[in-house]
Each structure stands twice: as structure tokens, then as C-alpha cells.
Amino acid sequence: MASSEDGVLRLAARLARCAGWDEATGLPNLRQFLAELDRELARAVRRGEPLAVFVGDGGSGFPIEQLATVVRSATRREDVVARLGKRRVGVVAAACDAFDAREVAARLRDSFKAPGACVGFRAVAASEARIADAVRLLGEAVAALDRAVASGRGGIEPSPGDPDPRLHPN
């Protein structure tokens, strides 16, 4: 009887782990990403630091099995990286202002090495972090990515809400 109970407990533990992780890539999934983004927002408030949220799309030719390795190579060890969808990845970079976010987005886009790869992002100033909402920030980064994809050129697109005017030449 004990072995049957042990098996059930092991299965329950595996299911609990899998609830927050994508098995194909080994990366956190959307649910886990939003929880991590909430934690990073709270940390940004405590430290008085900016942060940035990125959503990247590797393009149609990107092999999803390589997603974790490729994105990790373009980000810092402390950045939160997650798989958000079929070809989409999310990144939260702490202590990353709007100007630095442009460089991170370029590295992320270039890491995909696939035609049509795009990155949308939303930088959050330290003063804004205390009133920011994880779901809204992710939505703004996704909307920026969708604009980049719709342009048909591939590229990098900041969210219109980003605080640094240098990102918006218009």
C-alpha cells in the first residue's frame, strides 16, 4: 500500500512542478512568468530601480527546442525568462531603464537568427513601478510585439507608454 501512496505523492509533486513550467523548453510558463514579474515589480519598488519587460517572437523558422538556450545567451543570468506561447518568449530584466532596454531588445531579436524575428518591450521607470500591474505591463509589451510583427519587417518596438522620449523619434 505504501508504494501506491508513494507513487501518488510523486505524481502530485511532478504535476505541481509542471504547473509552472513548459516541458518542451524547461522554461517557466505564462503563469510562473506573471508571478515572477509581480515579484520583480515589488523588488524594483523596494530598491528604487527601473525594470523592463520583453516579449520576443522567433519567427516562423525558429526551432522551439532551442528557445531556452538562445534566449539565455542574450540575457543576464538574473533575468527572468519564460515561454509565453508557441514561438513567444518573455523576459523581465531588473535594473534596466528604457534606454538599456533598446539594447537588450536588439540582442534578444538578434539571438533568434531567423527572418521575421521581432521583440516588443515595455520599460518601467522606478517612479512608475509602485503603481505598475504585471498583467498590464505584459499586455503592453505584447501589443508592441504585435505592432512589430504587423510591420512585416521584423524588428524592435517599444511600448508607447515607455518613459524615455529617445525611444519614440516621431
Image (cartoon, rainbow, N blue to C red):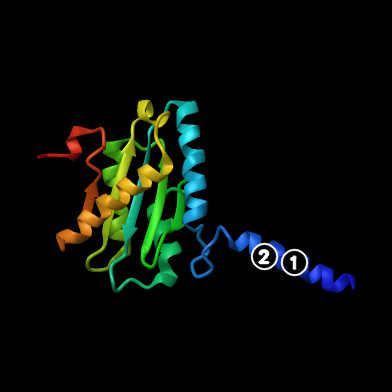
Residue 6: x and y, percent? 82, 68
Indicate the amino acid at tag 2. Answer: Arg
Residue 96: x and y, percent? 36, 38
Label 1: element kind: helix
Indicate the amino acid at tag 1. Answer: Arg
Q: Is residue 40 left or right of residue 127?
A: right
Q: Is residue 121 visible?
A: yes
Binning the other alpha carbons within 10 Å of mark 1 as few (below 14), some (14 to 19) or many (20 upward) gives few
Q: Residue at x 23, y 52 (%)?
A: 156
Residue 127: x and y, percent? 36, 25
Q: Is residue 125 left or right of residue 163?
A: right
Q: Residue at x 43, y 48 (%)?
A: 76
Check residue 10 in the rendering and tell me which mark sits there, or answer none.
1
Check residue 14 in the rendering and tell me which mark sits there, or answer none.
2
Closer-to-camera residue (73/135) = 135
The quarter of the displayed image where residue 61 is located: bottom left
